[in-house]
Amino acid sequence: MSIGNSPEDERPFENEHVEADREEARPSIGRALQQARIAAGLTVDDVSSATRVRMNIVHAIEADDFSACGGDVYARGHIRALAKAVHLDPEPLLAQYGDEHGGRPAPTPAAPLFEAERIRPERRGPNWTAAMVAAIVAVIGFVGFTMFQGDDSGNEANVAEGSTPSDSASPTTKTKKPADPKPEASDSAIAAAPQDKVTVRVAAADGRSWIAAKDHNGRMIFDGVLKQGDTKTFQDSSKVQLVLGDAGAIDLFVNGKKIEENFQPGAVERLTYTKGDPEAG
């Protein structure tokens, strides 16, 4: 009589096949980011410029190679930044990364509290030098006060005899004219921009955003991050080209007029403006 496997023994293998099918149905982290980038019409260079993540790291992550990130903390930060740049919800990708790489990183232990009572001031003896200086100052002050009182008595005697004090002795008080307040710079000053040039002002009103600006020759005139509240003004003889890393955080003024565009938070916008009325190229 042959001994075969019971149905109960085959169930674990069936469960493993189901789990494997589920894993195959879900794309990898790198594949999901790559597909979303292509669907958004962005290149690796665009995503690298918007997130400040180097291009070689973007390529490695899209190939599911996280060794170039420098650790789990940096890998999670890169995944979050890339997901936002290609308009993906980063939380499912971070949860998937945790499942595949051992869960969340261990929390850093809090630093011990500073105990002020352990620091006691060093006891020192009396400072005799300071005491002597104070005594000498007191004596000099007393002598000066006595001499001043004597001079006042002499002046009173002269007045009693009929003499009048000299006019030069009377103090004259001169009132200083307050300085004229300096005019403050106004936001409307951009309206006075030269008509023969294009003037673009970028203001980070609702958050921080990476900004790049080029002149009509394609020369980079600014490449950096504006913090919330910062502004930058660019001017060229014919054309200014912009790339806004987070267009939803930006207020834009061109040739003295505000650009009323409904830029979405996290959206990457490429814009070109010329002389005359605001016109996106």
Image (spheres, rainbow, N blue to C red):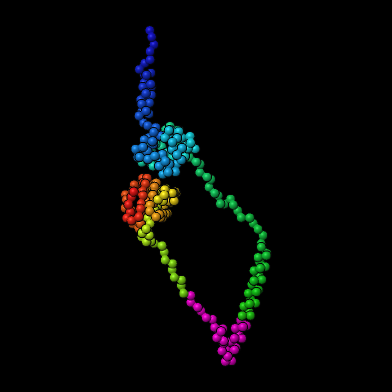
Name which residue lies at 43% across and 36% down. 59
Determine which quarter of the picture holds residue 94: top left
Q: Nearer the viewer, residue 3 or 122?
A: 3
Where is residue 193 drawn, in percent x and y? 38, 59
Determine which quarter of the picture holds residue 192: bottom left
Residue 173: in magenta span: yes
Name which residue lies at 38% across and 36% down. 34
In this picture, which residue range is highlighted in magenta?
149-176
Is residue 278 visible in the rendered image? The answer is: yes
Where is residue 37 drawn, in percent x and y? 37, 38
Residue 215: in magenta span: no
Name which residue lies at 64% across and 56% down. 123
Identify whether 188 is placed above or below 83: below
Q: Nearer the viewer, residue 190 or 247?
A: 190
135 on left or right of 234 = right
Q: Nearer the viewer, residue 166 or 199?
A: 199
Q: Quadrant of the N terminus?
A: top left
